[in-house]
Each structure stands twice: as C-alpha cells, then as structure tokens.
Image (cartoon, helix red, strand yellow):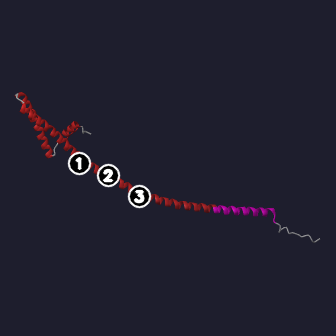
Amino acid sequence: MNDKKTIKVEEVPSNEEIEKTRAEKTLHLLEDELKSLIQQKKELKTKFQNKFHEVEKELQILKTKFQKKFQEIEKEQKNNQEWFDKEWQKATKLENKMILLWDYYQREVEILALQKQIQSQVLSTNRQESIKRLDKLIALNAGLEKGFKERQIEPELMEKLRKKIGAWE
C-alpha cells in the first residue's frame, strides 16, 4: 500500500501562494503598462515641444518677413503721400496761375470793351464814368501783374477768385 504517492505538504502550493503569484503577475503587468504609458507620454511631450518650437521658429520668420513687408508698404505709402502732396502743390500752383490769368484776361476783355465804348461815346458824363471804370480795371490788372511777378498774391483774392470760378474745395 505503499503505492500511494505521498505528496509533501511543502510541495503543493497553497491557495495563498497561487493568489500571490497571480497578484504579482497582475502587478508586474500593470507596472509594465504604466511604464509604457509614461514613456509614451514623455515621447509625446517631446514631439509636441519639438513641433511647438518649429512652429515658433516659423512664426518668428513669418513675423520678420511680414514686418519687413509691412515696413516696405509703409515706406511706399509715405513716398506716395509725399509724391501726391508735391504733385498736388504743383497742380494747385498751376491752377492758381490759370485762375489769375483767367481773371486778368476777363478784365482785359472788359477793358477793351470799355475802350471801344469810350471811343464811341459822345456825352462826357457817360464817358467819365466809363473812364473811371476803365482806370479801376487797369489798376486792378496792374496790381495783379505786379503780385504775379513778385509771387505775392493775397490768399483772400485767390479764395475769392476760386469761389467765382467754382474751383473752391
């Protein structure tokens, strides 16, 4: 009857040991997964930071390019404004000259008409009134000529003439 095998109690693992092993295996699996997850997070953070730095560099490059372009555009705008102001001034001077010439020749036509009228008038009263008017027009034109040559035309006169011709802004 010794055929029965005897198993030593020490050789048979108890339920506690089996459970402990299963718990340890689970613990080891969890530790491995946790370590893997932590490593993936670190890699993700590194990738993100690298990408973020690349984007920052590109952004800085773009900012620099756009700032340069913006400065170029501002400079061009300033140059255009200066050119416009200069051309506007030239055009205004030319316009003023033309207005003065127009005013001058308008009086010249009136002077010539008065001279013809004076020559054809017989009565001295009408003639004297026409001569006074003629003298006044001649004096105005002489003053205008002098002011034009000396470049000293009164702004009020220019304003009045501009309004008269309809060129007042």
- Name the residue at 51% across, 59% down: 52
Instruction: Examine the residues drawn in magenta and state their main secondary structure.
Output: helix
Few, some or many residues within 10 Å of mark 2 (<14, 14–19, 20+): few
Q: Amino acid at mark 3?
A: Lys
Q: Is residue 50 above or below residue 126?
A: below
Quarter occupied by residue 69: bottom left
- Name the residue at 13% across, 43% down: 145
Specify which label sits upstream in the sequence, 3 or 2. Answer: 3
Q: Quadrant of the N terminus?
A: bottom right
Quarter occupied by residue 24: bottom right
Visible in this render: residue 154?
A: no
Q: Is residue 8 above or below residue 34?
A: below
Q: Which residue is the site of mark 1?
A: 90
Tell me how far mark 3 sits from mark 1, CA to CA: 37 Å
Mark toward the viewer: 2 or 1 = 1
Q: Secondary structure at mark 3?
A: helix
Q: Amino acid at mark 1?
A: Lys
Left or right? Give the position of 37 relative to 4.
left
Report the magenta residues as a range. 13-36
- Name the residue at 38% across, 54% down: 70
Per the rendering, the mark at residue 65 is: 3
Tell me how far mark 2 sits from mark 1, CA to CA: 18 Å
User: Residue 36 at what x, y percent from top left?
Assistant: 64, 63
Q: Which residue is the site of mark 2?
A: 78
